[in-house]
Image (cartoon, helix red, strand yellow):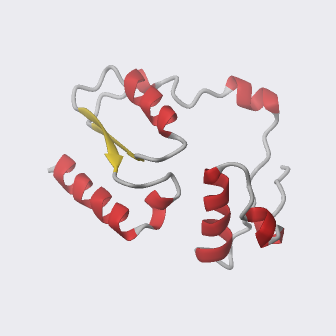
Amino acid sequence: MIYNANMTEMKPEVGHQLPIEMYREGYEYYVETHFHPNSHSCFLQRNLMDLMVYDPVQFMYLLDQPLLMMVGDHADTNYMSEQAFDLAITTKEKELYYLKDATHIQTYYKESVVKEAIEKLDIFYK
């Protein structure tokens, strides 16, 4: 297996200037604020062919259980959640919920967002 470079080796001035917001926030979260000493802070590198044949939403139509998807309303990844939600055509009870004032990474730790997510989970599953 081949791993990408360890993010902890990236200089802060580079991490803070990454061109995509989610990557900048990822650098801050995984390296600066929430780094765990047992973490490798790198991810498995995949080749282009692996990525081309992998479709994470291809079996969404098989879901027949209640589905709650939550995404930050400012997340770069909204389109992925929306696509997956639209393809979940078999489940009768489903909801796509937008967490207020949150990016993708902020849904992991921002106190107000986590609280909102927990409250939504409680309501949905009762």
Residue 84 horizontal side relative to residue 36, left or right: left
Give how far across and how far down residue 59 sits, in percent.
48, 24
Give how far across and how far down residue 99 sits, in percent.
35, 51
Residue 52 horizontal side relative to residue 86, left or right: right
Residue 90 horizontal side relative to residue 76, left or right: left
* Residue 122 location, quadrant: bottom left
Instruction: Residue at 44% x, 58% y: name it.
Output: 107
Which residue reaches farthest left?
126
Check the image and report above or below for 67 versus 58. below
Check the image and report above or below for 98 versus 117. above
Instruction: Residue at 76% x, 50% y: name it.
Output: 44
Q: Nearer the viewer, residue 72 or 124?
A: 72
Check the image and report above or below for 102 versus 28. above
How many numbered markers are drawn? Answer: 0
Give how far across and how far down residue 83 sits, in percent.
46, 27
Instruction: Residue at 72% x, 31% y: name it.
Output: 51
Residue 117 horizontal side relative to residue 19, left or right: left
Give how far across and how far down residue 3 sits, in percent.
82, 54
Q: Nearer the viewer, residue 47 or 79?
A: 79
Which residue reaches farthest bottom?
37
Instruction: Residue at 53% x, 41% y: name it.
Output: 77
Q: Nearer the viewer, residue 41 or 32?
A: 32
